[in-house]
Amino acid sequence: MRQQSELPIDTTPAGYRPLADRMRPRTLAEFVGQSHLLAAGRPLGRLLTDGVAHSLVLWGPPGTGKTTLARLAAHACKARFITLSAVVAGVKDIREAVEAARAARRAGGTPTVLFLDEVHRFSKSQQDTFLPYVEDGTLLFIGATTENPSFELNAALLSRARVYVLKPLGARELQDLLERALADGERGLGASGVRADPGALALLADAADGDARRALNLLEVACDLAAAAAGTLDTEIVREATAGGHRRFDKRGDLFYDQISALHKSVRDSDPDAALYWLCRMLDGGCDPGFIARRLVRMASEDIGNADPRALTLSLAAWDTYDRLGSPEGELALGQACLFLALAPKSNAAYRAFDLAMDDARSGGTLEVPLHLRNAPTRLMKELGHGQGYRYAHDEPDALAPGQTHFPDTMGPRIYYRPAPRGLEIKMREILDRLRPEPERDDDHA
């Protein structure tokens, strides 16, 4: 195994560099977290220890070590490291990086790592500009993204780069990092003389919410406050330093949709406690309560339907209540509706019936309305047979006209709606069992 050496030391005066930058790991041994990727024998671990090079994409939330891993990878491969941010870089910068890589290869065969941060910000056409140079080996590509690469990166680029999923750091990992920074006299805050009370660093780690950069930034702020006081970092100072913080919640990324999915599935699976937790997580993270209200209405139709029609009424009422009261008072109504939906009897019968009917409507073409169901407001239309033979239900015994067909003549009857044996749909099922015979065709619409 190759002996690990340190990355070149940044000579920028420490006073001008944030703590998070000063404490950036210089060796793999200093790196915290991502043990699932860095364990012995794993491809990323082999790259960082043995220099087994390949292009890769690092996908994970902020502060999980994407940039540091890219630097360590370039160092392990003895490669030049060119870093660009897709936020500000353009095609011109990519071309300059390619020319620099070619020159380095001609001069001495030195490989070049192109690290593209926020790679999801590049358009698909911009990604195409450096793809040929990844294919021919001019560049070793490392991309970092907080967004799902499946949606944001070209398929051709993804096929040439291995994707590694980084996880948020655990509370214990963050606390270890904070303890190290507080004790480090060279790069950290050891020279400040600040000491931390038991529990203060744990509180900081919790507030950082899996983000190492945020944890170190909060520690730096808290230590400044502590130094101005008695030199002791206690829980009160931590609370002051972390006031106004929010949990991670990306309003357009995977975390957003994952939490929406967790809320919806908790309701569907009749787990009111988990459903309320995810609803509160989203509100705490800054999600628009109106968006949550819309999703509750959707759940009421999709997963409960006619098993308890009150679910739709209550969801709409909760939405209206929020619109009238706003936050935070109106959020309680959303929580109330969420609990009701979770505990209501479940049925997707209406949802399935709608989908089946829509499939037929889209695939069947413009089938004619049967003559007996057509409107006949004029004499000509009556002469053409419109409305002829229609049996007015209210003139029939029990207001029923058995045997009267309502589907297009060339289509034949269908059964879309099959009420679930739960809630109010039990009674609906009994009524339908009396009203409709089984159709002759009953295949994929069963």
Image (spheres, rainbow, N blue to C red):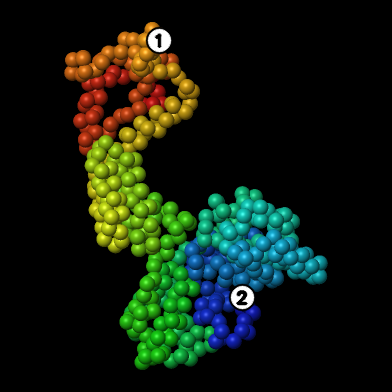
* Residue 4 numbered mark, or none: 2
Q: Position of residue 119 (x, y in %)?
A: 59, 60
> Is residue 140 toward the left or the right of residue 170 in the image?
right
Q: Is residue 224 left or right of residue 314?
A: right
Q: Secondary structure at mark 1?
A: helix
Q: Quadrant of residue 376?
A: top left
Amino acid carrying mark 1 in the image: Leu
Q: Residues within 10 Å of mark 2 (few under 14, many from 20)?
A: some
Q: Residue at x 45, y 65 (%)?
A: 168
Residue closest to the eye, 234 or 53: 234
Report how many numbered discs are placed on residues in the image. Answer: 2
The C terminus lies in quadrant? top left
Task: Indicate the quadrant where residue 300 lies.
Answer: top left
Q: Left of 252 or right of it: where is 49?
A: right
Residue in the picture at 52% in, 80% down: 18
Q: Is residue 137 above or below residue 438?
A: below
- Residue 109 x, y percent position in the rendering: 78, 67
Going by the numbered disc 2, the residue's amino acid type is Gln
From the image, state whether disc 2 or disc 1 is nearer to you.
1
Looking at the image, the residue that sits furthest to the left is 398
> Which sits in the foreground, 57 or 309?
309
Question: Is disc 2 in contact with disc 1, using a CB cutoff of under 8 Å?
Answer: no
Q: Say if residue 293 shows up in the picture.
A: yes
Q: Which mark is residue 380?
A: 1
SS for tag 2?
Answer: loop
Residue occupying the far top of the picture? 383
Q: Is residue 294 above or below residue 60?
A: above
Q: CA distance from mark 2 to mark 1?
A: 93 Å
Above or below residue 407? Residue 45 is: below
Q: Residue at x 52, y 57 (%)?
A: 147
Figure check: 401 above or below 166: above
The N terminus is located in which quarter?
bottom right
